[in-house]
Structures are given as C-alpha cells and as structure tokens.
C-alpha cells in the first residue's frame, strides 16, 4: 500500500527542481579571487566580459603580472586591459585611473574591503572612497562615491605593465577625453595600438600634472562620479559609439546575463565546493582571445590595415600555451565563437603572422606557434578553413622553423606533420609527402636526445638549451605518431614502463605546458586505467611536484592539491597562461580530453561530477552521467553511448556535436583489460 505522503514527496521534488532551474546561476559560483596572490596563477579579479578586449582591474602595490595582489593593501589605481595568467610579467595595464579626495591626488589608497563577481569588482578605501566597476562588451563603467569634498581622478595615459608604454596622443573635448595608446606586447616582442574614449557624467576640469598625466577635478561639493570608457582597434569614433547611457545596474545585469549564458554552456552537477571550483576555472578559460571587430564589421588586422568582414575578428592569442587544452575546450562547447576564432587565425596568415606578435597588433597578445596544428584540428572538426588561401604563407612559416634545440625540433616536427596533412586535404601529394618526410625526422631527433635515459641531465630544467622543460618532459611530444613513439621506446611494454617511471619518479611538471598532455597517454594503450587514475589525482587529489618554472628537481617540493579555490590556487610559478591550465581542469572535470590536437577524437574518463552537460544551451546537448559516482570510483567499468554498449574509450567530435547520452559505470577497482577498439595515432593513419 503506497504511503499517503508519497504525492507530497513527489510535489516537493518537483518544486525543488523548478526552484533550482530558476535560481541556479553559474556566475554566482565564480570566485574571481582564485589565483590572484603571488606566483600562483597570475590572475586578476578585474571586471570583465566574455572575450572582451577591455577589463577594469585594480593595480596594487606590490602586484602580480595582471596588476593585482590579493593580500596587498595599497592601491595605485585601476587599469583597463590585461592577458590573464601570462608570463613575461604580463601585458596590458593601460590607462591608470586613481580616484582622490580632499584635493590630494598623491594620497595613498588603502584597502578596507573588497568584493568581486563575474563582470564586477568593488572596493572600499580607508579614506572613505568607494569604487565599483563593470564591463559590457567594449564599454567599461567606473562608479566612485566620495565622503569628502574636492574630489576627482588622476589619469596616467603612459601607464603599462613592465613599463612597456611607447606613445600616446589625446584630446580633450568638454567632459570627454579620447585618443590612442601604443604599448609593447608580451615579452616585448611587438606593439599594439588601442583607441579609447572616456566620458565623465559630471563637469570636470582637466589639469596636466606631468607628461601623459592629467587630473580630472570635480566641482568642490560633488561626491558621486561615473566615468565611462570604451576601446576600439579602429579609431576614436568607434570607441565613442560603444559608450551608451545605461545605468550601472543595467550594465552589470546585462554582463551577469552574458556570463551565465557562456558559463551555462557546460552544466555540472556535484558537490557545491567542486562546482564552484569548476566554474571559477571555466570563467578564466573564457577571457581570451578578444573580440576586436566593431558592430559595423570593421576591425584592424595585425599589420595595422583597416579591414571589414561579416566574420568576427579575434586577437589576443597564447596558442603555444593553450592549444592542447583551452582551444579544444572552446571547439567543443563554444562552437559559434570558435568558428570566427579559427577564421581569425587563418586571417593572420594573410597579414604577416609572426610567432609572437607584429608591430601593429590591435590588442595585447602573446604567441601563435602551432597555429597550423590548431587550423588542421578545426578543419577536421567541421569548421570552415580555406587552406588554399593561406598555403603559401603556411610554407613560408614552415621555412622559418628553428630545429636547433631538442625541444624546438619536436615542436617543429608537429607542425611539419600538420602541414603534411593539410596538403593531403588539398590533394597535393608532392607537398604532402615532402612535409611528412620532414615530420618523420622527429625520430632522428628523438633517438639523439630523448632515447637515452641514463644521462645525468635528463631531469634538469633547461638542459641542452630547452625552453621551460626537461628531457623527460619533452620526450613525449609526438602526439601525431604515438605508435611510432611506442616503437622508438622498444614496444608497448617498454613504453608503458617508461611512462610509469616518469610519473612514479615525479618527473611530471604541471606548472607549465610542455608535458600537460602526458597524463592522457595511457588511454590508447592496454592500460587505459592509469590515465583515468592520473587525471583524477592531478585534478583533485594530493600530488608531489618537484618541478617549477624557476628551478630544477628537488628544491622545496610541493605536496598537496594543485587546484584549490583560493588566492594561492596553483603551484608556485604555475601561470594560467590564458586559460591553458584552468582549461586542463575543466576538461578533466567534464570527462573528456583530446587524443591528439589535429584529429577530431577525444578520450573518455570518469568526470569529477555525477552529471555533465556539454552545449547545454543548444538543441543538441551532450550529457554524461556517472553510475556509482564516488570519490574512490575513478575507473571506468563500462561505457554506454545512446543505449549501446561501447567497446572503446573514445568519441569523435561529430558524435559529441550530434548530442546524446554517454553513461559511465564507475568502479573503485581498475578494469585491467584493453578496449577492443583502441584509438592511437600513427603517421600512416590516413
């Protein structure tokens, strides 16, 4: 006989479900202060908008790369652009604005309290000034409230991180200040130029105090000020058009809605603590590249020329850093934007693309090595790429490759392979064979520098003039020919033994990108459970880390969890690098990792959540459900895809994009048998 309370129980479950759907907001789960202290991520709590070239963030003393240190009390002001988590002490930091009161613009601003959320930052100072900021698309809004009289703001148009300011011109018209600024890109490899317009909602008197420095002074008794600012790559007029009259609350609400839409593309269900960490890291992966195009479709290309296209042009790249993680993530869950992003990469080849940056960038940017791999990957995932239009430029780029050090040789060979595959697509067999032969030379490089593991420098950071990595860490960089790599190691048994030694000997370095794909490399072997275990461990469990970007093995090792939702979030010296390492966690959380960038295939592991929905806001969402979910149940017992038992641990990009249901039966014991249908790369895979 059913309980008389059963209908009420069902009703209560229904009501809870409705309330959850109405009130659930991913932006509320974002902690903008994650990774904002010391050399533990190099992130900022700046008010930002998805993929916007403008963000308003605090400039503290002392500061980290993006201008802010969580534990610092003294503020120098607020700046308007940055690349999140990048090295070389960062880039951006233009147009420093500092509010002042009682006529003293030199008075120190000392933090009393602060608050931040997705798209918003606010701070209260001990002198009574309250400041809050929001950003919507290319427009940012400052709001200052003062308790004393004789207030205003100090403006430093010559400010830039690491002193990379080059030049500026400005003009004052009434309450408007506008002009342009030129600054150096990351690592001072080039320059970018941005136009801006600043509008004050109250009458201000401008006063020059030094070169590139102004005061905007309010009438003595005015105690509330709004300052609107907009950026453009094209000209001042376009910046002015981005400024509107919406209130602070209206702009903030619109930005919150935009963040919820983007963050909501991936829905996860699990513990609140882990969900909060997931969305805080996904937020970081959606900061760049930047939308450069204007509403009339005009934009400035990387050679400084004015262009127009119905496509949206993006800039602000860190491809060497994030091509293994953040970009594959965007290709999976942000398909509308990703098509234009890849078109933008293609367009760079038409306008003088450099490995780092040109002298005429339309925004700050880092580097673009492996763009050819990313374009091949996009094409195979169904994105439109016109290889014919850029074939000559791809060849010219390839001709400039430097194979002089062991790491550069393997990096270059990866691009050689990608170019060979592109010419195969273009049905140019002669060129395809030429670049395949060039790619196969990796075997000579590998035998010369990476085969012998008895040499005394194999665990030394920077040995043999390599960049931010060791022989142990770089030797696995043959993702396009893992079968060939296995043969070089002496067969699968020897290959697995060497992978085991790599991880058991703590040679792996999660503080930088050269080997972040290696935990996935058991997937295509007879021991896939080892990747399942490693991914879970690195993402949420205690690890040993002996390597950092400023030393070699054995100096002050780290023991603990890498990903934590605190200001000191990552390993020390572990830069997020424009979503590269936050993207790694998001993929780990979702249960999917790229098998090889350049092939549209993903390996599957047990997600960090009981349920994951990719492309939630589309008609073809893809759901992953975990049966027997638990912290100890990290191994796959069985996989069922759309009702059919899978005999493989991989899916194609097309299968995911078509939507459906992947059911993972999890267990706490590794299933020590290989999959009947294994997927592994080989150069003869065509």
Image: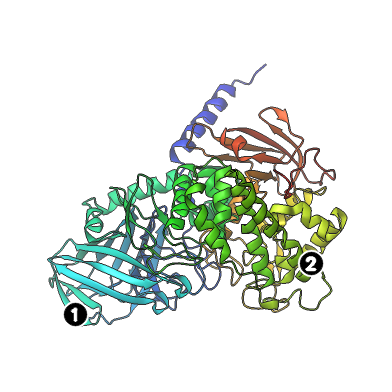
Spot the residue most to the front. 430
- Left or right, 541 with reference to 492: left
- Circle 1 sits in a helix, a strand or a loop, which is it? strand
Q: Report the side of 406 relative to 226 (left or right).
A: right
Up-down relation of residue 253 to residue 496 (above or below): above
**Residue nearest the observer in this picture, 224 or 486:** 486
**How has the structure been colored for display?**
rainbow
Residue 91, image x, y percentages = 43, 70
Q: Is residue 80 visible?
A: yes
Q: Which residue is mark 1?
A: 208
Crowding at dot 2, Cα within 10 Å, few <14 / some 14-19 / many 20+, comes out as few
The location of residue 76, given as percent across then percent down, is 35, 76
User: Which residue is located at x 57 percent, y 27 percent?
Assistant: 9
Determine whether 137 is above or below 678 in the image.
below
Q: Is residue 288 visible?
A: no
**Residue 447 tag number:** 2
Spatial CA distance of label 1 from label 2 is 64 Å
């Amino acid at each position: 006989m059913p309980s008389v309370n059963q209908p009420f129980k069902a009703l209560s479950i229904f009501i809870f479900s409705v309330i959850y759907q109405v009130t659930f907001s991913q932006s509320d789960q974002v902690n903008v202060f994650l990774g904002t202290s010391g050399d533990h991520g190099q992130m900022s709590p700046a008010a930002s908008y998805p993929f916007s070239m403008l963000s308003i963030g605090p400039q503290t003393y002392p500061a980290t790369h993006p201008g802010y240190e969580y534990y610092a009390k003294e503020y120098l002001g607020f700046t308007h652009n940055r690349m999140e988590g990048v090295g070389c002490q960062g880039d951006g930091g233009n147009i420093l604005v500092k509010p002042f009161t009682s006529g003293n613009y030199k008075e120190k601003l000392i933090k009393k309290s602060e608050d931040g959320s997705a798209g918003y930052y606010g701070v209260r100072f001990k002198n009574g000034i309250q400041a809050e900021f929001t950003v919507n698309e290319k427009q940012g809004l400052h709001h200052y409230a003062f308790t004393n009289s004789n207030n205003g703001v100090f403006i430093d148009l010559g400010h830039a991180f690491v002193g990379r300011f080059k030049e500026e011109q400005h003009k004052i018209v009434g309450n408007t200040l506008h002009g342009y600024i030129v600054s150096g890109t990351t690592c001072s490899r080039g320059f970018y130029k941005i136009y801006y317009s600043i509008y004050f909602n109250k009458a201000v008197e401008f006063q020059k105090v030094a070169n590139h420095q102004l005061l905007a002074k309010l009438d003595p008794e005015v105690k509330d000020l709004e300052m609107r600012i907009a950026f453009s790559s094209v000209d001042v007029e376009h910046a002015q058009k981005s400024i509107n009259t919406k209130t602070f609350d209206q702009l903030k609400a619109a930005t919150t809605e935009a963040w919820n839409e983007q963050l909501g593309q991936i829905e996860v269900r699990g513990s609140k603590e882990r969900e909060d960490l997931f969305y805080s890291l996904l937020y970081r992966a959606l900061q760049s590249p930047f939308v450069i195009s204007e509403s009339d479709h005009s934009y400035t290309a990387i050679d400084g020329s004015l262009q127009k296209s119905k496509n949206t042009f993006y800039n602000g790249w860190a491809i060497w850093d994030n091509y293994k993680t953040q970009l594959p993530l965007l290709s999976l869950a942000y398909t509308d934007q990703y098509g234009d992003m890849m078109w933008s990469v293609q367009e760079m080849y038409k306008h003088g693309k450099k490995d780092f940056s040109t002298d005429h960038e339309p925004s700050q940017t880092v580097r673009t090595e492996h763009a050819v791999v990313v374009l091949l990957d996009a094409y195979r995932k169904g994105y439109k790429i016109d290889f014919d239009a850029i074939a000559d430029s791809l060849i010219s780029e390839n001709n400039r490759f430097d194979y002089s050090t062991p790491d550069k040789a393997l990096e270059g060979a990866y691009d050689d392979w990608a170019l060979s595959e592109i010419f195969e697509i273009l049905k140019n067999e002669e060129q395809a064979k030429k670049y395949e032969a060039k790619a196969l030379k990796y075997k000579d490089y590998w035998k010369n520098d990476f085969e012998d593991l008895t040499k005394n420098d194999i665990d030394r950071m920077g040995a043999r003039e390599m960049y931010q990595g060791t022989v142990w860490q770089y030797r696995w960089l043959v993702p396009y020919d893992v079968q060939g790599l296995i043969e070089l190691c002496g067969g699968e048994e020897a290959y697995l033994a060497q992978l085991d030694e790599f991880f058991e000997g703590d040679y792996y370095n999660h503080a930088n990108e050269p080997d972040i794909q290696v935990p996935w490399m058991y997937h295509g072997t007879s021991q896939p459970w080892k990747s399942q275990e490693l991914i879970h461990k690195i993402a949420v469990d205690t690890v040993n880390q002996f390597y950092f970007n400023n030393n070699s093995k054995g100096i002050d090792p780290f023991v603990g969890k890498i990903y934590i939702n605190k200001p000191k979030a990552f390993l020390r010296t572990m830069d997020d690098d424009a979503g590269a390492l936050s993207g790694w966690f998001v993929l780990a959380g979702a249960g999917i990792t790229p098998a090889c960038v350049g092939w549209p295939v993903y390996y599957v592991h047990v997600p960090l959540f009981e349920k994951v929905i990719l492309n939630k806001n589309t008609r073809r969402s893809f759901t992953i459900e975990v049966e027997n979910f638990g912290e100890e149940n990290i191994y796959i017992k069985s996989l069922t895809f759309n009702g059919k038992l899978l005999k493989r641990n991989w899916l194609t990009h097309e299968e995911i994009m078509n939507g459906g249901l992947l059911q993972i039966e999890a267990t706490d014991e590794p299933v020590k048998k290989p999959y009947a249908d294994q997927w592994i790369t080989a150069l003869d895979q065509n």
